[in-house]
Image: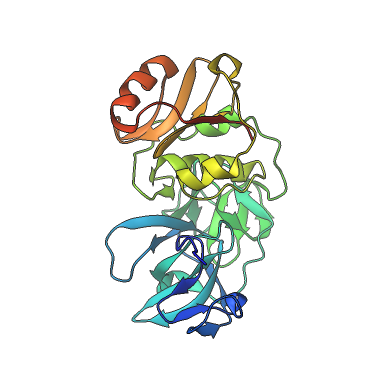
Amino acid sequence: MKFDSRITPIKNNLASIRYQGLIKKKRFVKGKSFFVISTYSPLYAKKNSIELSSQLLFGEEFEVFEVANGLAWGQSKRDQYVGYTPLQNLSQKKIVAKHKVNALRTFIYSKPDIKTDPLTYLSFNSLVCVEKRKNYFCKIKGLGWCFANDLCHIKDIKFKISDLAIKYLNTPYLWGGRDSMGIDCSGLIQNIYQMVGINLPRDTDLQESFITNEVTSETKIKTGDLIFWKGHIAMALDNKRIIHANAFHMRTEIEPLKSAKTRIAKKYGKIVKIGRC
């Protein structure tokens, strides 16, 4: 039986206890729940790798199966992605998130006062527990104060998808990024759709497989439709324009689908799928 190592917690002689009986010659481990307590935590496919695979956002749960040399190996509970992340960015103290960040970025202050120096920031789609409110601020448990309008209830999914995407306009491109300081093509799409309650997988090919509702013609493209090339994804703002994080512009950019197709074809070939969530 073959498993995708990106989304399956199996490695060398170690595996999640969930796979006991399916595979042999492994040490089966019951995972422990940790939560991200840093703005983001990098996720790497291999130990000691310098190639970023993804990022975990504040408040996300990470199931840890092994800890060694300051690194935790485990699986994101939100999108099932597997990898190594610094243990210092995690805590076993449970974050009961009832709110999420709906601004591209919100500053965290030590006091409910915009004149104080920010302690840090949180990015769009981060998950938080609001402890109390004061004036126009919310106190995030274990962290600090942020502007209340930058948060919404975790169950709030009634957003205009194009408005969410445009928040990222000009955000720098970063391979493996999901944070507001740098994002890649599939990370952009994943964050946007998680905000409206659709939990897409992390990578482009996995997202392509996930979406089974195909749009058969470019003339039928609507806002929010996803356009796939081999190794790249964009979202339609309408039937003529797309928005995507890309390494050509090195940022999130809006451009005509017609001209983007011509350029992208030189590297990734023709469009392989148009899908609708």
In this rendering, position of residue 60 left or right of residue 185: right
Q: Residue at x 31, y 22 (%)?
A: 263
Residue at (30%, 30%) from the top-left corner? 249
Q: How many marks?
A: 0
- Location of residue 84 in the rendering, given as x and y in whole percent from the top left corner: 40, 69
* Position above or below: 203 against 257: below
The outermost residue toward the front is 1
Q: Is residue 214 above or below residue 147?
A: above
Does the rendering let one see residue 8? yes
Q: What colour scheme has been applied to the protein in the rendered image?
A: rainbow
Q: Residue at x 59, y 56 (%)?
A: 127
Tell whether 236 sits left or right of 55. right
The quarter of the displayed image where residue 232 is located:
top left
Residue 12 image point, x, y percent? 40, 77
Can residue 87 be seen here? Answer: no
Picture residue at 51% right of the left edge, 61% below the top: 7
Query: Which quadrant is home to the C terminus?
Result: top right
Query: Which corner quadrant of the image does residue 157 belong to?
Result: top right
Residue 229, how many percent across, how many down? 42, 33
Q: Nearer the viewer, residue 39 or 4?
A: 4
Q: Quick one: 37 or 202, which is closer to the camera?
A: 202
Residue 58 percent coordinates (x, y): 51, 59
Is 36 situated left or right of 195 in this image?
Answer: left
